[in-house]
Image (cartoon, grey):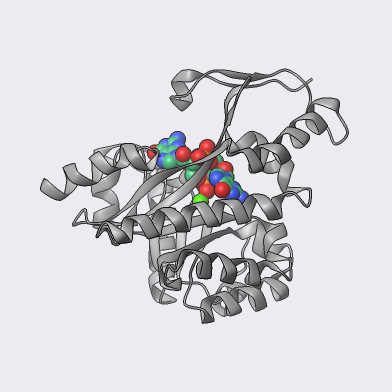
Amino acid sequence: ADIAMYSAKDRGLGVCVYDADLNEHSPERLGLLGELKRAIDTGELVLHYQPKVGLPGEDVRGVEALVRWEHPQRGTVPPAVFIPLAERTPLIRPLTRYVIDAALQQCAQWLAEGRSLHVAVNISARNLLDERFVDDVLEALARSQVPAHFLELEVTESAIMADPTRARAILGRLADLGITLSIDDFGAGYTSLAHLKDLPVHRLKIDRSFVSSMATDPSNALIVRSIVELGHNLGLSTVAEGVEDQDTWELLGRLGCDVAQGYHLCRPQPADVLAAWFDSVQSA
Ligand code: C2E
Ligand code: CA
Ligand code: CA
Ligand code: CA
């Protein structure tokens, strides 16, 4: 049986141990999926937000919404456990709709408080292949009254490469609405440059596997530098995820990376906790 452990130290959260194997038809997997279906309706899914900070000026550009499951018995279940399960079922549609709705409602509240923050939501391959997805997004925008350019969608390379032609068509419709599009975990997958050139995206998010060790590993620093140059040559801005220390932050600034995100700047937090952080950086 697979054992996935998330220590309190790693996550800053409670300890969750999943002792069952999460194979396709295992009772544990089906049980979690059934509970997840309920959790979407009962408000057990909550969003944390992690700031994205501009280099080198440290202005806050926006936030990424990251979902957590506050399970009444299991404690906090991280997305790495339940998103991959949901992604293989139709449940990912109501889940993503819930996350987009909640993120846009929070965005509307920030706007009302005078904080102009863009909010990014992660979407799955299955969302991108769903004909109803663009309408789902339009309805959420209408409900929240938030202008489309405040919404950013993060799509992984692998989600795009699952069906590049279809992905390009849907991304094109989303871009036409004024939504910002980012390729997530860039460099970890296999986007061919021919595809990248034709994708209607605005940003590359450089995968954490390169960023987190770039200050000590010259070959990873070289990869980050190459991605920044590639992005800029294609007219895309570049975002580094997983910035964990000051050396990495400074190196990214020297390499011309546009935006950074990571524990060194701020951990993902509930919106009310983040309010104090926003105030502290504004007055700094
Ligand atoms: P991701 O989109 O690549 O998100 C970044 C992950 O890195 C987040 O983990 C974040 O908490 C973590 N992180 C941020 N800064 C640092 C850092 O400096 N060091 C390290 N070691 N980690 C950092 P999280 O929140 O556990 O999310 C994991 C993945 O789950 C996400 O990876 C994303 O693929 C997925 N996910 C999260 N929320 C959603 C969602 O609402 N919908 C979908 N479809 N996927 C989601
Ligand atoms: Ca992401
Ligand atoms: Ca990542
Ligand atoms: Ca990811």
Q: Is residue 257 visible?
A: no
Residue 173 is left or right of residue 275, and the answer is: right
Residue at 18% from the left image edge and 57% from the top image edge: 57
Residue at 43% from the left image edge and 69% from the top image edge: 231
**Nearest the eye: 129 or 108:** 108
Q: Quadrant of the C terminus?
A: top left
Residue 256 location (% of width, % of height): 28, 62
Q: Residue furthest bottom?
A: 176
**Nearest the eye: 212 or 87:** 87
**Nearest the eye: 108 or 253:** 108
Q: Residue furthest right?
A: 25
The quadrant holding residue 248 is top left
Q: Is residue 136 visible?
A: yes
Residue 134 location (% of width, % of height): 63, 71
Residue 241 is left or right of residue 197, and the answer is: left
Residue 234 is left or right of residue 96, and the answer is: left
Residue 79 is left or right of residue 205, and the answer is: right
Residue 243 location (% of width, % of height): 35, 43
Looking at the image, how many numbered discs can be counted on the residues?
Answer: 0
Q: Quadrant of the N terminus?
A: top right
